[in-house]
């Protein structure tokens, strides 16, 4: 009976596929759904910062014919706080999944043929992307939540 399993050509193609995947993730490391969650957490956090630190609390929404009483404004703050919490949790879970997938592919041999310098450059670039695309939105949400909680307890 002959050899059963991947041929050397199959192994080479798989290695090339992993290398291409890593190159692609450096240019666009997160899935579309993660980037949409990132946008949502940044948008909700922006509104939270505006309400908490700038003091922009709507007294009415004339488009809908709604006027807010003082206690309704507090309910609006609670609602905004819950929205920011939801989006930051949802984004964190998706971002963690994407980062874990990229690390797993890299550990499985996506960068085996690269030199130590190339691997270091790839790791640095990936780290910068993680800081900008993950840490900054989460910190923005934390700042918004601190301000919103401060407004609620004031």
Image (spheres, rainbow, N blue to C red):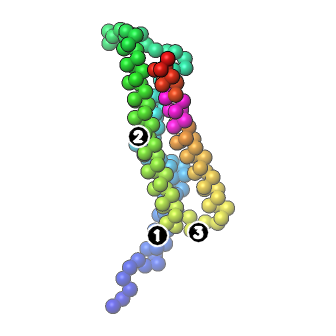
How far separated are the C-alphas under marks 3 and 1?
Answer: 13 Å
Quadrant of the rendered structure where residue 61 is?
A: top left
How far separated are the C-alphas under marks 2 and 3?
Answer: 36 Å
Q: Are marks 1 and 2 in contact (CB under 8 Å)?
A: no
Sequence-earlier tag: 1 or 2:
1
Instruction: Specify whether residue 10 is in view.
Output: yes
Mark 1, Cα crowd under 10 Å, few <14 / some 14-19 / many 20+, is few
Q: With respect to residue 130, does 71 lie above or below?
A: above
Q: Is residue 29 magenta?
A: no
Closer to the camera: disc 2 or disc 3? 2
Q: Are marks 2 and 3 in contact (CB under 8 Å)?
A: no
In the rendered image, which quarter contains the N terminus?
bottom left
* Numbered disc 2: secondary structure: helix
Sequence-earlier tag: 3 or 1:
1
Identify the residue under disc 2: 90
**Image point (60%, 46%), residue name:** 128
* Numbered disc 3: secondary structure: loop
Q: Which mark is residue 113?
A: 3
Q: With respect to residue 87, does 61 lie above or below?
A: above
Q: Is residue 144 magenta?
A: yes
Residue stretch in magenta: 138-145
Residue 125 horizontal side relative to residue 37, left or right: right
Instruction: Specify whether residue 46 is in view.
Output: no
Closer to the camera: disc 3 or disc 1? 3
* Numbered disc 1: secondary structure: helix
Residue 22, percent across and down?
52, 57
Q: With respect to residue 1, does 46 lie above or below?
A: above
Q: Is 11 or 135 nearer to us in this picture?
A: 135
Residue 22 horizontal side relative to residue 37, left or right: right
Residue 72, percent across and down?
36, 14
Sequence-earlier tag: 2 or 3:
2
Identify the residue under disc 1: 13
């Amino acid at each position: 009976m002959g050899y059963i399993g991947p041929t050397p050509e199959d192994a080479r193609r798989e290695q090339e596929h992993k290398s291409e995947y890593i190159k692609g993730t450096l240019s666009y490391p997160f899935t579309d759904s993660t980037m949409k969650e990132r946008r949502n957490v940044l948008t909700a956090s922006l509104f939270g910062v505006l309400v908490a630190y700038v003091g922009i609390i709507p007294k009415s929404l004339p488009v809908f014919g709604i006027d807010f009483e003082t206690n309704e404004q507090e309910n609006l703050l609670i609602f905004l706080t819950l929205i920011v919490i939801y989006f930051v949790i949802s984004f964190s879970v998706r971002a963690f999944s994407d980062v874990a997938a990229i690390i797993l592919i890299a550990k499985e041999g996506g960068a085996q043929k690269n030199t130590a310098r190339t691997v270091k450059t790839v790791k640095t670039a990936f780290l910068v992307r993680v800081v900008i695309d993950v840490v900054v939105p989460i910190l923005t949400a934390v700042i918004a939540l601190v301000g919103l909680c401060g407004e609620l307890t004031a």
